[in-house]
Image: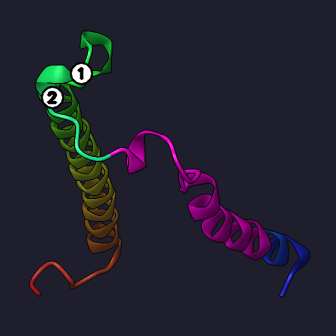
Amino acid sequence: MTMLKKLSVLFLTVLLTGAPLLASQPPGGAATDGFVPLDSLPPQEQLPAAPLLVTAYAFVWVLLMAYIWSIASRLRKVEAEMATLQRRTPGAAGR
């Protein structure tokens, strides 16, 4: 294994094992106080779901379109190479 691979494996290991530790909540605080109805929260603490949902769907659609564009461009390159090889190879036009 090269040094770069070892470092990348180490980095990913630290990242994947350290992220849950950083994401955990400290004991006490709002999470242990119990259920708080949405109506009783101040407006700055309410998080509307619609903008987040639209953003998530838009992000997925952008990724999907980029993936399809990537596949189409690679397919065009392969088809062009096949056409070039077919012109170069004598007697291959009938196959």
Query: Residue visible at 34% across and 72% down?
Result: 85
5 versus 49 height, above or below:
below
Reading the image, the residue beneath label 2 is: 38
> What range is drawn magenta here?
8-33
Residue 67's disc is none
Which quadrant of the figure has residue 82? bottom left
Residue 12, position as x, y percentages in the image: 68, 68
Q: Secondary structure at mark 1?
A: loop
Q: Secondary structure at mark 2?
A: helix
Query: Residue drawn 32% across and 79% down?
Result: 89
Identify the residue at image location x=25%, y=60%: 75
Please give the count of numbered marks on the rendered protein: 2
**6, 22: nearer the viewer:** 22
Instruction: Specify few, some or many for label 1: CA neighbours under 10 Å numbering under 14, 14-19, or 20 or more.
Output: few
Vertically, is 82 above or below 63? Answer: below
Whether residue 83 is situated above or below residue 2 in the rendered picture: above
The structure residue drawn at horizontal position 83% and vertical position 70%, both measured from the top left corner, is 7
Residue 51: give x, y in percent of width and height: 18, 23
Q: Amino acid at mark 1?
A: Leu
Magenta stretch containing residue 37, yes or no? no
Hey, which residue is sitting farthest top in the picture? 43
Assess whether mark 1 and mark 2 are in contact (beta carbons under 8 angstroms). Answer: yes
Residue 79 in the image, given as x and y percentages of width and height: 24, 62
Q: Does residue 16 belong to the magenta stretch?
A: yes
Q: Which mark is residue 41?
A: 1
Amino acid type of disc 2? Leu
